[in-house]
Image (cartoon, rainbow, N blue to C red):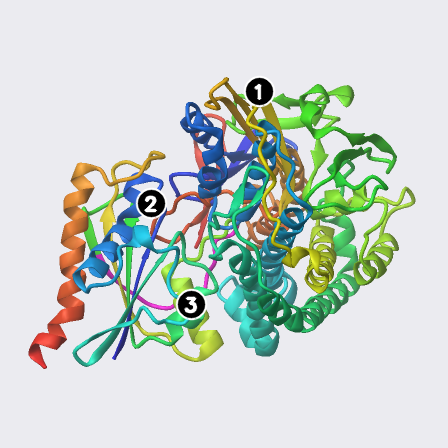
Amino acid sequence: MTILVIGYGNPSRMDDGVGWYVIDQLHRRWGLPPLELLSEPAADGSDTCRLGPHSVRCVWLQQLDLDTADLVAAADRLLLVDAHLDGEEIAVIEVEPRPVLGPVTHVVTPAALLALAEATYGRAPRTTLYTARGERFDFAAGLSPEVQTRADALVRAVLDEVEAPVCTS
Amino acid sequence: MPTRYVVEPVTRIEGHAKITCIVGDDGQVQQARFHVVEFRGFEKFCEGRHFSEMPTLTERICGICPVSHHLASAKAIDILADSKPTSTAYLLRELMHMGQMTQSHGMHFFHLAGPDLIMGPDADPAIRNVVGVIQANPELAVRAVQLRKWGQEIIAAIGGRKVHPNVAVPGGMAAGISRDVGNALLAEAPRHLETVLIGIDLLLAWVKNNLDVVKRFAVFPSYYGGLVDPHGALELYDGNWRLTDPRGRVAVDQYDVQRYLDIVGEHVESWTTLKFPYYLEAGYPDGCYRVGPLGRLNNSSYLKTPRAQEEFEKWKSFCNADGVQEATLFYHYARLIETIFCIERAQLILSGDEVYGSDIMAATPGRLKPRGVGVIEAPRGTLWHDYTIDENGALTNVNLIVSTGQNNPAMCKSVEMVANTFLSGNTITEGMLNRLEMAIRAHDPCLSCSTHAIGQMPMVVEVVTEDGTVLDRAVRG
């Protein structure tokens, strides 16, 4: 199975960088370079790693955009990691394709991204969004202490999803 | 009692926007307000930092047009460092900018505005979206994705990555481009030019079939601003500033961008944090000007590349007797003409030898100038970066004037006109919602790039009286 993990957000806006933090932790665990040493995901997918029967690739973005659709369509399973504003401290949401774009912005939602992948490439993977509620979005690097704890919980949740099948195989 | 209609489409922590239409007893919209929460904190955040950090810092403002911020900032720090980029560095920057313009314009027309045109403004929002476009014309949709990717590949070829490149330095660039990569990009250019021309055919067919709509849809006079070269031709990377009046006469020409505050004022309204730039001599609100593709084409005498000039002449045939295009929906045509210009400029640069040179960084003399203003034509319009530093190079003042702010009066006016045409009593109709979206989208505002949150962004329209009683409410998204 090809698993794609996308962490997105703006690491220059404190807790908005949760997604990048999770990807960085996954890289370190799997022996890949930390994000601070990389400019962007390898264009040729050479940063894909093997975990038992699975190919797992981590991607980090400031925001989802239309170009992400081909990457998404090529995956069998998609895990998204993000921050949110209101609600539960941590949320795990199954995402279904839904093709509505925002009326006045450039934002592409996870649901719209899946719809785009489905329409353009004929397939969209089963997708789960892992998200932590942010507390501070100031112009600064690093997570707030509360969100640091939530971010570590997201790392564990993603690892449970990605590595569990390896243990049972 | 006046009735207030509120459209609140965005739920992000930044880039909040809503539309309020204040309607009198006669049912006419007296005033429309497009509220934008501009996050001025970024400018404060930069103070105290060394000026050389700014190209890297400021591009974090936006995930859609970081190259524009990167290059406007680079131009400002060239001046602070008193270091003029080499000719190779100049071309590398311009080429990267052409890539940025192409990917941004391409995405806007084919994916964001396309649904309005292909599906029509009265189509169900469930199909009036990019997926609807793909289903209606799958081949064009794929071409559009490839066009955007080409623009991003240009950025990545020079800047090392397609988003947030970190390559411009005082007096030049930290990296160049190889001829092999340049040739590969060049080989693809004709196909992408063809894609834009398909887009123009599609657009003009829609205009032909909907001429009455185009002529009634947010058509109004204004000033128009943008950069031009010494002969008055469209410039996107460099040049001096020109302002054209509502009758198509040049009001200000070849103005030194370093002194922009001598002619541009910023009006403040109590209901928004976004300032309203205007031409001082004409006063506020008469001196408000439109920027971006429509503003730039109304402001330019001609375009320097052959195919774009050919299309520009066709554009002129749609203008009024003064040679001015006042129709908001013509932003789309202007955007596509500019995309042709960008592809042709990229072809020209990539076909030459100079961009592949090794002399990419000028010497910095070591003395600093106290103030530098960097200006570029970003996809959405003129972008100003104005920095003041102390003797050690630490920033003491930062002022960023973004294009969406300059277009704010025009967006308010567009919304007011559309609401007046389509508002029916106290009832918010689907038709009104669709057309409000179209009016705003034509300007391609960039409101929400710095950060984001999950969740669909609803468009909420409320009809309320001034005492807050909700008479009608509609939610979309």
The C terminus of chain B appears in which quarter of the rendering?
bottom left
Q: Identify the element where label 2 is drawn.
A: loop
Give the amino acid type for the residue marked by disc 1 in the picture.
Answer: Pro
Q: Amino acid at mark 3?
A: Ala
Give the mark nearest the N terminus, 3 or 2.
Answer: 2
Where is residue B463 shown, x and y percent of the image? 50, 38
Using the rendered view, name the quadrant where residue A115 is placed.
bottom left
Instruction: Tell me where the magenta segment starts and ends, as one range.
Output: A92-103
Between B454 and A5, the one nearer to me in the picture? A5
Q: Residue at x 64, y 47 (%)?
A: B422
Direction from residue B46 to residue B32 in the image, left or right: right
Q: Which residue is mark 1?
A: B370
Viewer-proximal residue among B407 and B371: B371
Quarter of the image for residue B78 reads top right
Q: Residue at x 68, y 26 (%)?
A: B258
- Residue position for label 3: A43
> Above or below — where is B403 with respect to B331?
above
Q: Nearer the viewer, mark 2 or mark 1?
A: 1
Mark 2 residue type: Pro
Query: Contact, CB < 8 Å: mark 3 with mark 1?
Result: no
Q: Is disc 1 surrounded by few (<14), some (14 to 19) or many (20+) residues within 10 Å?
A: some
Q: Is residue B220 above or below residue B203?
A: above
Alpha-carbon distance for marks 2 and 1? 31 Å
Q: Is residue B461 visible?
A: no
Most common SS among magenta residues? loop
Residue identifier under label 2: A11
Discs 3, 1: same chain:
no
Task: Indicate the secondary structure of the residue bearing disc 1.
Answer: loop
Quadrant hosting residue B108:
bottom right
